[in-house]
Image: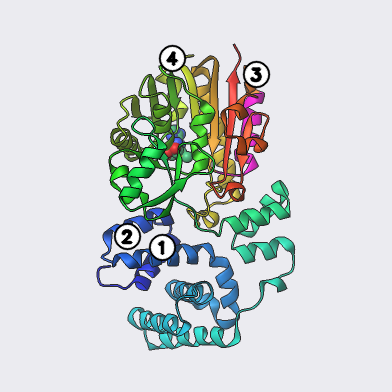
Amino acid sequence: MKHKNVREVALDVLLAIDEKEAYSNLLLNQTIRSTRLPERDTGLLTELVYGTVQRRDTLDYYLQPFIKKSHKLQKWVRMLLRLSLYQMLYLDRIPDRAVIFEAVEIAKKRGHRGISSMVNGVLRAVQRDGVPSVDEIQGDVERLAVKTSHPYWLVKRWASQYGLQETEKICMANLTAPKQTARVNTVLATVDEVIAMLEEEGTEVERGELAEEAIRAKKGNLVDTKAFRNGYMTIQDESSMLVARALHPSEHERVLDSCAAPGGKSTHIAELMKRTGQVISLDVHEHKVKLIKQQAERLHLPNIAAYVLDSRQASQYFARESFDKILVDAPCSGFGVIRRKPDIKYAKNEKDLRELARLQLAILREVAPLLKRGGTIVYSTCTIDHDENEEVVAEFLRLHPEFTVDDTLSERLPEKVRPYVANGQLRLLPHYFDSDGFFIASLRKKV
Ligand SMILES: C[S@@+](CC[C@H](N)C(=O)[O-])C[C@H]1O[C@@H](n2cnc3c(N)ncnc32)[C@H](O)[C@@H]1O
């Protein structure tokens, strides 16, 4: 990809995402590292890729009247049209003629004269006639699905779980750019000290809105700082930071993190325990366990021990009632983090959700006997789907009468989120605080 310009690179990344070679965020980071794009272009590349993926279905709706034999369109040509239309409609600073010129050049290079004149024709027709209005779409759910580019089944599902108004807010929030936040490693420095370090490096930051150890980047990338490299912080969304707070580990405790990679919450727990006690971090993937170890080292946290293990076999390796606290930050559909990984919304289906719920329950059930009496399990996900959240908890409690919901959860959480806690469970939707959609349940084992 060495000699390609930013739009050609964007097209390659978009096609790879479409082929499900990798999630958008991973692929994009990888591409930024491996291509020799000038630094000023990496921001544009991110915007082009995320924007085109985020608005895919809306863009297709807009393009439809202008493409005659839509079914015959090659994948890359459709993607090029989406990418170009995205710029024409949503990016003010790029003139249409520049977008069309670039699209035609790419079409010539990748295809032949016929394709480039078709691309030129379609984009010029859109420029001349304007796109159709989504308001003409019949049916509230259908209209919202196309307007916000979410699959119909998902909008219908959320509408039945949250009502149409709240669903619209969720969908709209999913189209906004996520903020970059970091959690200060309070073992090494205070929040104010890290803010001062970053400002000295020329990175503008502010305190977070929810978590006391959170900072938000106003300008610049926190990962490219000395403070990050030296272990003073971890990139993490503010909603995620509430999980370790909910678990509330004390010094010298033994804590199990059953789904731990890449280690965001394990390291937070280890920090809250002030490097005492032990966090046992499990993950089923070997390459991911390496990431936990790397993070523990970078953050100077010797109280984490990470192992490759399927948590559904945990009871073969650990004694009954041997942990003070257990975290199950379960694999999930990720529907709370669509703005970070917009392709997720097209990749999953209802069958996946059913399978995930089964896996989530199986992990919870397997680790439950390992918890001491009087101890706490925190179950969390970065999804907002009832079946993966409230329903899993309800089923677990039905099958495990030795557990109850923990009504003290809200005392351990920041005041701002307390209105969203009920029955020992917190559900955050992405538009509440401009943070990830998240679910946290605290369950206590009876004495
Ligand atoms: C939501 S992520 C965990 C994020 C992590 N807690 C953090 O804060 O960085 C879920 C993790 O569960 C792992 N996983 C999936 N199935 C598992 C299983 N059966 N046993 C253990 N880990 C599993 C995945 O590899 C993934 O890393």
Task: Give the CA separation, mark 3 to mark 1.
Answer: 49 Å
x, y (%) of residue 10?
Answer: 39, 68
Dot 1 amino acid type: Thr
Contact (CB < 8 A) between labels 2 and 3? Answer: no
Task: Give the CA separation, mark 1 to mark 4.
Answer: 47 Å
> Which residue is identified by label 3?
401
237 versus 426 height, above or below: below
Dot 3 amino acid type: Pro
Using a 10 Å C-alpha cutoff, classify the residue at mark 2 as few (fewer than 14 neighbours), some (14 to 19) or many (20 or more): some
Pick whichever of labels 4 and 3 is earlier in the sequence.
4
The mark lying in front, picked from 2 and 3, is: 2
Q: Magenta region: which residues?
A: 383-398
- Report the predominant secondary structure element of the magenta stretch: helix
SS assignment at label 1: helix
Q: State which quadrant residue 143 falls in.
A: bottom right
> Which residue is identified by label 4?
319
Q: CB at mark 1 closer than 8 A to ligand 1?
A: no
Pick whichever of labels 1 and 2 is earlier in the sequence.
2
Contact (CB < 8 A) between labels 1 and 2? Answer: yes
Residue 330 visible: no
Task: Give the CA separation, mark 1 to mark 2.
Answer: 9 Å
Task: Give the CA separation, mark 2 to mark 3.
Answer: 51 Å
Q: Is residue 170 magenta?
A: no
x, y (%) of residue 391?
Answer: 65, 35
Q: Is residue 435 left or right of residue 162?
A: left
Dot 2 amino acid type: Ile
> Which residue is identified by label 2?
32
Using a 10 Å C-alpha cutoff, classify the residue at mark 1 as few (fewer than 14 neighbours), some (14 to 19) or many (20 or more): some
**Residue at the spot 43% in from the left edge and 27% down from the top edge:** 272
x, y (%) of residue 170?
Answer: 62, 53
**Residue at the spot 39% in from the left edge and 69% down from the top edge:** 11
